Image: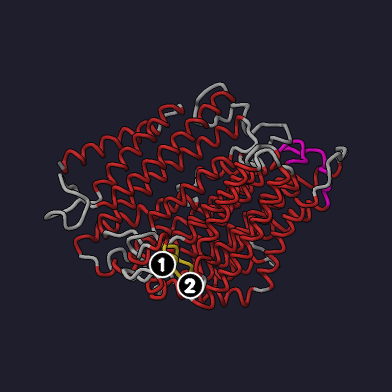
């Protein structure tokens, strides 16, 4: 049995971050070594937890040994284990890139903030309690505020202010939703909610519907679902590139929470809510995808282009999530894995370009950048992944989603295929401005130190995409079983051992 | 008492939302604070309103629900910390750009038009 292992993905980064702030304040090298070591350990832990969740089924950890639903529990199931592994893998690439590119030296606290971010996101994936989810959201947000303005600058500070204000409103909304949940059901434990809601008295159905919509609104803010996506382009485009890459997993926290609540707590066969959530998310996802694709085509700077690509990928993920059937959810999970790695890789490539190019604008050319050949190859690979073209996993992900939506083919297929076409156009146009048109101009002298680790991080993410493509068979099989377990939450509810304690 | 609490929450939320939609950072922060006050009172009400009862089962006929009190305590601490953070960020933004407008105007030379390659992630 896993015992105390379940809480380690939360405790390890928290401990390391505290150690960095207190004992390694002025020693960048020590912070780098500790940070990478901690993230490597996190990867090993995540692998062990994934193995344990796949073989032993859902497991619970009682914080302070208080019995559920009175105390807070962490629940490890296949979905949360998969998301923690995704987080750890992304963090490894990001920290290598940050060290290689020197981004982490531009402010005092990059490494501790990154560790706190890992703690918050990991906790949000693992927690089995809705209020605890709020607390972990706040932890990841406060770390992301610090990372967002890392490196300073006026535009970044003001974009950061908008980001913080938007998220504080989201937090207030979350608290309203949680208070409503508690007043209707008398519990905030996710397993307890899933067990109690089917027997809810008829009179509370209206309140429950309000609760469900409020919760989904909060998760839609996190996941940048239209019409709540306005914070994303400004934030991601103004954040340091390496931080934007790390933020690629933050939108997935919204997707994860939507999936967890939509499939487990408010499933489509719950009489009080029915298909309410699905009816809201599916159209919003379609519009998000279209807006993202148009944004990719019309973006004036490279970071905004990638940010809109991120919005489009969230739209695709939410379309697949919004149907709430086991088949579509398995496709959604595959696409979430793919799009996190692809968006992060694209942000890293964009950062490689921006730091070498004279300006970030796509409306005019600039002298060719140093190492243009290698970087343009990386750009092409990442763009293929983002746009969902063969041979990378984006194509397989979209294929899985299209296949799962045979029933609604005319609408969903045409939106996904058309927006893919727009994104191909957008990425190709940007690529030709960045790499082809300048080839006639004179190159700027290359006085940069080689950034081996930065390229390692970027290649690592692309290697992850290749692995996801090659291992698509076993991965989708595993994801199928995962989404089946999400729609049959008896295992999850039994694992929480409601009212019995440890 | 229900009416009084409901009116209080409604007023605080309305004021908070109005102020949050302002263009300067100081009213926006005030609005966020108002919103967090509103949500704190709302959290209290989620455990049903009872007067003069101990939060202990068996101490009397009825009891006050202790869980919302714990939730409110957590929410207060978090919103307090968040307000401090956004305050610092607003002051930082004001000192760097010389004004406290929240919007990012396209005419503003500070954003979308930075030529410095190192800081030009705009």
Asked if marks 1 and 2 touch (Cβ < 8 Å), the reply is yes
A118 left or right of A465 in image: left
**Foreground pick, A117 / B117:** A117
Query: Disc 2 marks which residue?
Result: A483
Depth order, front residue of A395/A463: A463
Name the image quarter holding residue B33: top left
Callout 1: residue from which chain? A
**Viewport quadrant of the C terminus of chain A:** bottom left
The residue identified by callout 1 is: A263
Q: Residues within 10 Å of mark 1 (few under 14, many from 20)?
A: many
Residue A251 belongs to magenta span: no
Q: Is residue A214 above or below residue A190?
A: above
Task: Give the magenta-colored segment's residue range.
Answer: A355-373
Q: Is residue A63 above or below residue A402?
A: above
Q: Mark number for residue A362?
A: none
Q: Of callouts 1 and 2, which one flags the residue occurring earlier in the amino acid sequence?
A: 1
Q: Secondary structure at mark 1?
A: helix
């Amino acid at each position: 049995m896993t015992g105390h292992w379940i809480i380690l993905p939360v405790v390890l980064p928290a401990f390391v971050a505290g150690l960095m702030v207190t004992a390694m304040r002025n020693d960048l090298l020590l912070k780098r070594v500790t940070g990478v070591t901690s993230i490597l350990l996190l990867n090993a832990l995540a692998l062990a937890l994934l193995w344990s969740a796949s073989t032993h089924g859902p497991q619970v950890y009682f914080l302070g040994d208080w019995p559920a639903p009175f105390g807070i529990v962490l629940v490890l199931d296949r979905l949360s284990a998969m998301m923690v592994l995704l987080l750890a893998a992304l963090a490894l690439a990001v920290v290598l890139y940050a060290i290689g590119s020197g981004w982490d030296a531009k402010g005092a606290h990059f490494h501790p903030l990154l560790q706190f971010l890992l703690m918050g996101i990991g906790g949000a994936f693992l927690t089995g309690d809705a209020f605890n989810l709020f607390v972990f959201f706040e932890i990841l947000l406060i770390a992301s505020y610090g990372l967002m303005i890392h490196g300073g600058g006026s535009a970044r500070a003001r974009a950061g202010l908008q980001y913080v204000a938007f998220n504080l409103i989201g937090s207030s909304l979350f608290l309203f939703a949680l208070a409503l949940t508690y007043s209707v059901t008398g519990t905030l434990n996710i397993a307890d909610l899933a067990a109690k809601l089917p027997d809810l008295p008829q009179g509370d159905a209206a309140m429950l519907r309000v609760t469900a919509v409020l919760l989904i609104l909060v998760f839609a803010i996190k996941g940048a679902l239209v019409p709540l996506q306005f914070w994303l382009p400004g934030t991601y485009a103004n954040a340091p590139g390496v931080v934007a890459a790390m933020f690629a997993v933050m939108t997935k926290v919204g997707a994860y929470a939507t999936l967890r609540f939509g499939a487990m707590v408010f499933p489509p066969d719950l009489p009080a809510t029915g298909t309410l959530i699905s009816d809201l998310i599916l159209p919003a996802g379609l519009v998000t995808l279209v807006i993202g694709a148009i944004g990719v085509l019309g973006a004036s700077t490279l970071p905004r282009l990638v940010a809109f690509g991120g919005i489009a990928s969230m739209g695709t993920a939410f379309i697949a999530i919004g149907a709430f059937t086991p088949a579509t959810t398995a496709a959604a999970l595959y696409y979430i894995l793919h799009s996190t790695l692809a968006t992060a890789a694209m942000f890293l490539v964009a950062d490689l370009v921006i730091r070498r190019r004279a300006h970030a604008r796509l409306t005019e050319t600039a002298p060719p950048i140093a190492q243009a050949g290698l970087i343009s190859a990386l750009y092409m690979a990442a763009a293929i992944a983002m746009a969902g073209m063969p041979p990378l996993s984006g194509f397989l992900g979209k294929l899985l989603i299209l296949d799962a939506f045979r029933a609604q083919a005319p609408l969903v297929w045409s939106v996904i295929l058309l927006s893919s076409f727009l994104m191909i156009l957008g990425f190709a146009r940007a690529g030709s401005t960045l790499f082809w048109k300048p080839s006639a101009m004179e190159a700027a002298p290359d006085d940069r130190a080689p950034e081996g680790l930065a390229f390692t991080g970027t290649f690592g993410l692309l290697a992850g995409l290749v692995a996801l493509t090659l291992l698509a068979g076993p991965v989708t099989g595993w994801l199928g079983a995962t989404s089946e377990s999400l729609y049959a939450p008896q295992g999850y509810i039994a694992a929480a051992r409601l009212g019995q304690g440890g | 008492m229900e009416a009084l609490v409901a009116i209080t929450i409604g007023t605080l939320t309305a004021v908070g939302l109005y102020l949050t939609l302002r263009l300067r950072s100081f009213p926006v922060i005030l609005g966020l604070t108002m919103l967090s006050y509103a949500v704190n009172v709302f959290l209290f009400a989620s455990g049903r309103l009872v007067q003069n009862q101990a939060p202990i089962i068996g101490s009397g006929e009825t009891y006050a629900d202790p869980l919302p009190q714990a939730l409110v305590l957590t929410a207060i601490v978090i919103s307090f910390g968040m307000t401090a953070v956004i305050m610092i960020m607003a002051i930082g933004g004001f000192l760097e750009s010389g004004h406290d407008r929240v919007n990012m105007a396209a005419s503003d030379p500070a954003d979308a038009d930075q030529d410095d390659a190192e800081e030009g992630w705009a």
